[in-house]
Image (spheres, helix red, strand yellow):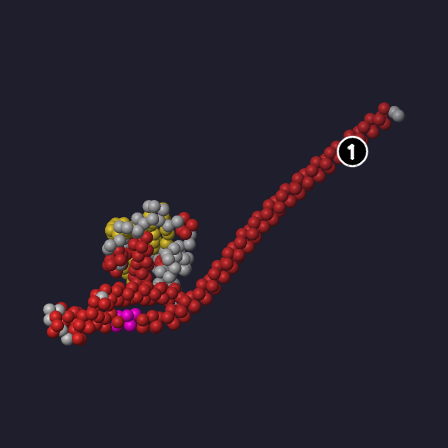
């Protein structure tokens, strides 16, 4: 083969190789772009999948809340019916106990006069009439003083139990009903003092009351609902204190919120219970002694004022409930 032919062949092979290299580089570029597109789309698919999972989780949560809401609505209707059916007979029992107490006072007066009659004739000896002797023996045999004292205690315990039942039924009735808040301009410090006056008989022998009020503006609120909420928190604090303790009330303003702290020196709330204490019907008290609606009603009352309720507790140290109320944002139309 001539040298010229060899040179021409080499040139053609070189040209072909350059063309192949250019084609390979072009294909590599296309492959890179395709890979980048696939990765981008894969990332989009992953993000969409994550968003879909989040959406499904939210749907599941909403479904659970709806189920709970429907159950609570049914419980509310049931509670309303129970409260209505038991309210009248329980009121009759309370009135009857009050009537018995009045009649017992009359009986005590008669027995006291009989006792005085017996005492005045105890020196007559053989001159006592058979009726006096029989009456004297009956008094000694039956120990009327103990009987009357025991009847007093039984009536007092029965009346106290009836009052507790009426309170539970009232809580159930309030829980099952809705209403609108009745707004008026009030001072929170004054409402706390009013609540302390209402709870004085329960708090006096259990705890020392410490007021640490800060300067707070008057706000539009439903005083009745807030006093009821404060009362629930104060009574819970008093019941939590085993022996003599301290309940401290603090108020102040932070940014656009007015806050109220009610703190006690009780034993504290166990950690597992903290997430459940605002749930309706949850209670750590003995069965039948509480409805488990007090703190739930506190939460509802505060939320109706566009506020929020939090709790902080340390076992062995005490518990603090904080109520946060917005100063300027009140519509007065949201139902409880």
Taking the magenta stretch, the answer to whether it contains residue 84 is no
Residue drawn at point x = 26 percent, y = 55 percent? 203
Circle 1 sits on which residue? 16
Looking at the image, which is closer to me, 261 or 135?
Answer: 135
Query: What is the tally of numbered marks visible in this picture?
Result: 1
Which quarter shows the N terminus? top right
Q: As drawn, is 156 to the left or to the right of 19? A: left
Q: Residue at x 12, y 72 (%)?
A: 126
* Side of 54 where 6 appears, left or right: right
Residue 327 appears in the rendering:
no
Residue nearest the observer in this picture, 148 or 153: 148
> Where residue 90 sits in the image (x, y, percent)?
34, 70
Crowdedness near tag 1: few (<14), some (14–19) or many (≥20) residues, C-alpha within 10 Å: few
Q: Do we see residue 273 in this rendering?
A: yes
Horizontal and vertical percent position of residue 156: 27, 65
Position of 5 with respect to 330 (left or right) is: right
From the viewer's perspective, tell me whether residue 34 is left or right of residue 317: right
* Quadrant of the rendering where the C terminus is positioned: bottom left
Look at the picture and state if 314 lies above or below 282.
Answer: above
The magenta region covers 94-99
Mark 1: secondary structure: helix
Q: Position of residue 28 (x, y in %)?
A: 69, 38
* Quarter residue 55 falls in: bottom right
**Compared with residue 219, is residue 141 higher up or lower down, i.e. above or below?**
below
């Amino acid at each position: 083969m001539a040298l010229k032919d060899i040179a021409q062949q080499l040139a053609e092979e070189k040209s072909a190789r350059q063309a192949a290299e250019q084609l390979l580089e072009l294909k590599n570029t296309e492959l890179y772009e395709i890979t980048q597109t696939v990765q981008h789309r894969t990332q989009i698919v992953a993000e969409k999948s994550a968003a879909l999972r989040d959406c499904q989780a939210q749907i599941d949560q909403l479904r659970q809340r709806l189920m709970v809401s429907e159950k609570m609505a049914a419980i509310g209707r049931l509670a309303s019916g129970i409260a209505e059916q038991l309210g009248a007979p329980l009121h009759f029992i309370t009135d009857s106990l009050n009537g018995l107490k009045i009649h017992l006072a009359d009986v005590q007066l008669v027995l006291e006069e009989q006792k005085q009659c017996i005492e005045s004739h105890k020196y007559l000896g053989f001159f006592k009439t058979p009726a006096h002797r029989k009456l004297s023996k009956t008094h000694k045999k039956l120990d009327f003083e103990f009987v009357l004292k025991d009847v007093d205690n039984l009536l007092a315990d029965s009346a106290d139990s009836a009052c507790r039942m009426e309170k539970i039924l009232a809580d159930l009735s309030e829980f099952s009903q809705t209403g609108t808040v009745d707004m008026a301009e009030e001072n929170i410090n004054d409402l706390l003092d009013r609540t302390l006056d209402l709870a004085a008989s329960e708090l006096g022998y259990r705890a020392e009351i410490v007021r640490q009020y800060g300067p707070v503006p008057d706000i539009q609120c439903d005083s009745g609902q807030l006093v009821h909420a404060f009362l629930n928190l104060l009574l819970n604090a008093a019941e939590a204190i085993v022996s003599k303790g301290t309940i401290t009330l603090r108020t102040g303003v932070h940014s656009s919120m007015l806050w109220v702290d009610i703190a006690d020196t009780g034993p504290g709330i166990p950690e597992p219970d903290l997430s459940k204490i605002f749930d309706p019907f949850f209670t750590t008290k003995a069965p039948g002694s509480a409805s488990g609606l007090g703190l739930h009603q506190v939460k509802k009352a505060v939320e109706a004022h566009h506020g929020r309720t939090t709790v902080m507790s340390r076992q062995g140290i005490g518990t603090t409930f904080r109520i946060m109320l917005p100063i300027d944002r009140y519509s007065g139309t949201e139902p409880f």
